Amino acid sequence: MSAFHQAFAEALTGDPEALAAWVQTPDLAIVAVYRNTIASALVEALEAAFPAVVAALGSDNFRQVAAAFARDHYPADPMLHDYGDGFADWLAAQDALADMDWLPDLARLDHLRLSVLNAADGVATSAEVFADLSPEALSHARARLIPAARLIQFDTTLLSVWDALLTGEGEGLERRPESETLLVRRVGEGVEVRRLDADMAAFLSVCADGGTLSGAAEVALTCDPTTDLTALFSHVLGLTCLQLSTESDPL
């Protein structure tokens, strides 16, 4: 980056005097036009990326919060389609929002939805390919989640709150103090979010971490000894979210 471009970046983030070597003092106020335009674009990007947080705070309040975040968090990439990484942690650190302790989790789910929507394409392995493997090969095989499918876990139930906010329903905003694992996956041009039963969540978590299918089955059984592994695996394959590798090393 040239000295001018570095100075211009500093001017946009609040120090117009950084451009004094190139721009006459009376003209430095013009920089504010660029700064305001960029700030507005960042707020709009955050508004599009975090719809549940917008619904929870209200549009006017959200824009104030987003503007405060954007002042100190300029995007690292000129493309704003994934802007907002770190927004959830920033929300958690705001004393003024302490009474909405669930807001950062809403932001995490919103951001994951956006990440999945923009994730690279990856072809899930078909059920037929798994069926063609010998029992030994299947046991030692590893199958990780495709890029457009991710897991996220919360300490309280959040999906019902997220859904209620996005649909504008008045009910469903009460959380329960129980762990909840969600599968967020791209389906067509949209994103599906579903709550997983404990055994399936355990199975897919092992897969996501690069473990073997036999290891995933063992953890699922530990989680729920009554689990029907055949039915569980059939259900998992029906989600078309796993990509098979028969290599000895993790993907």
Image (cartoon, rainbow, N blue to C red):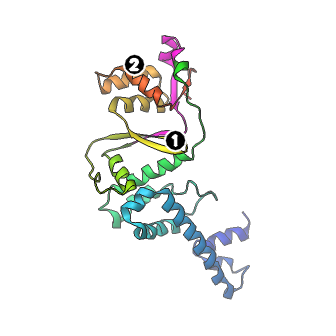
The image quadrant of residue 227 is top left
The image quadrant of residue 102 is bottom left
Residue 135 within the magenta-colored segment of the rendering: yes
Q: x%, y% of residue 71?
A: 52, 69
Q: Amino acid at mark 1?
A: Arg
Say what secondary structure mark 1 lies in. Answer: strand
Depth order, front residue of 190/153: 190
Q: Which residues are magenta?
A: 131-152
The image quadrant of residue 8 is bottom right
Depth order, front residue of 50/102: 50
Say the numbered circle drawn on residue 124. none
The residue at 33%/41% (across/down) is 180
Graded by Cα atoms within 10 Å as few (under 14), some (14 to 19) or many (20 or more), the crowding at tag 1 reads: many
138 relative to 10 in the view: left or right = left
Q: x%, y% of residue 55?
A: 39, 61
Q: Amino acid at mark 2?
A: Thr
220 relative to 42 in the view: left or right = left
Residue where numbered disc 1 is placed: 186
Graded by Cα atoms within 10 Å as few (under 14), some (14 to 19) or many (20 or more), the crowding at tag 2 reads: few
Residue 150 within the magenta-colored segment of the rendering: yes
Residue where numbered disc 2 is placed: 230
Q: x%, y% of residue 222?
A: 32, 24
Visible residue check, residue 91: yes
117 relative to 9, above or below = above
198 relative to 44, above or below = above
The residue at 33%/22% (across/down) is 221
Visible residue check, residue 249: no
Say what secondary structure mark 2 lies in. Answer: helix
Q: Pick the quarter of the image with the N terminus.
A: bottom right
Q: Say which label, 1 or 2, has the lower sequence index.
A: 1
Count of numbered circles in the view: 2
